Amino acid sequence: MIVAEGLGKTYTSGGRPLTVLRDVDLEVDPEAFVAILGPSGSGKTTLLGLLAGLDQPSAGTVLLDGQDLTRLTEDERAQFRAENVGFVFQTFHLLPTLTALENVLVPIELRGARPGRNGAGPHDRAVSLLERVGLGDRLDHYPAQLSGGEQQRVALARAFANEPKILFADEPTGNLDAETGATVIELMEELNREARTTLVLVTHDMSLADRARRVIRLHGGRVVSDDRVDPAPAGPVAGP
Ligand code: ADP
Ligand code: MG
């Protein structure tokens, strides 16, 4: 459960305050699938960063599962994120000197290597995550040796490495062709359905937004609409 109250962000650039997010009140239920839409510069990335505890708000609070992120130190927030949150950055942020496999291993080791659900060690777990995103034959490639779509999928495997309760993704299909984008969307829906991961996604991609069960629109740093919707009937059929 995410609860944001009175959330605001003001940057100071050139000595002048610039408010890019204001008065955002938001509750996101566990297992929700939320798409955040809005024009460029409307505050989507800023909002996602605040909800994920990557950044501190100038006003308001964010509670993730009852934990007030604004009261934690930076180290405590990092630890909390490692335990609870996966984040796919708009520009991937893969570590260039590490292979695909090593990139996925980072959060697993950061969290403190412990056996996964089925007893798999960190290495096997990272391999199986990369296989799941179709990169089983790219384990030892460095980011520079991967296409944008492949890097996006490594970033997704890394974000999901610790089976986060909440996956935040900033335009996760933004650099993908339609086919690869569809694969990534299916993968995220699978996480939502099977691992019960809450999805909070920023997107311009209507084929992704159409899959969400809730659509929030931002404009000029404010929430201008918030609609519960029936997702379009496409993709693989859910279980009984
Ligand atoms: P979106 O993701 O919707 O395109 P952002 O959240 O990235 O929008 O940015 C919202 C506004 O905040 C933009 O006008 C941007 O220029 C400004 N902004 C973002 N980050 C900073 C920063 N670190 N310092 C100053 N202004 C920023
Ligand atoms: Mg953005």
Image: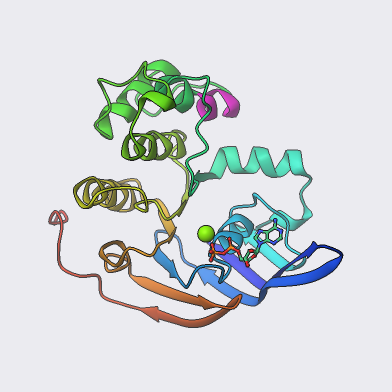
Residue 63 point in image, percent of width and height = 64, 61
Which image quadrant is residue 69 in? bottom right
Image position of 27 with respect to 179: above or below = below
Q: Which residues are magenta?
A: 106-111
Residue nearest the viewer, comparing 209 with 72: 209
Name which residue lies at 46% across and 76% down.
217
41 vs 125, left or right, is right
Which image quadrant is residue 235 in? bottom left
60 vs 178, left or right, is right
User: Does the magenta portion include 108?
Assistant: yes
Residue 36 point in image, percent of width and height = 45, 68
Name which residue lies at 66% across and 37% down.
79
Total marks placed? 0
Residue 43 point in image, percent of width and height = 58, 68
Q: Spot the residue most to the front.
A: 14
Name which residue lies at 64% across and 58% down.
50
Name which residue lies at 46% across and 20% down.
102
Residue nearest the viewer, comparing 215 with 19: 19
Task: Examine the residues drawn in magenta and state their main secondary structure.
Answer: helix
Quarter of the figure that contains the C terminus: bottom left
64 vs 39, left or right, is right
Image position of 91 with respect to 99: above or below = below
Residue 209 point in image, percent of width and height = 32, 67
User: Does the magenta portion include 44?
Assistant: no
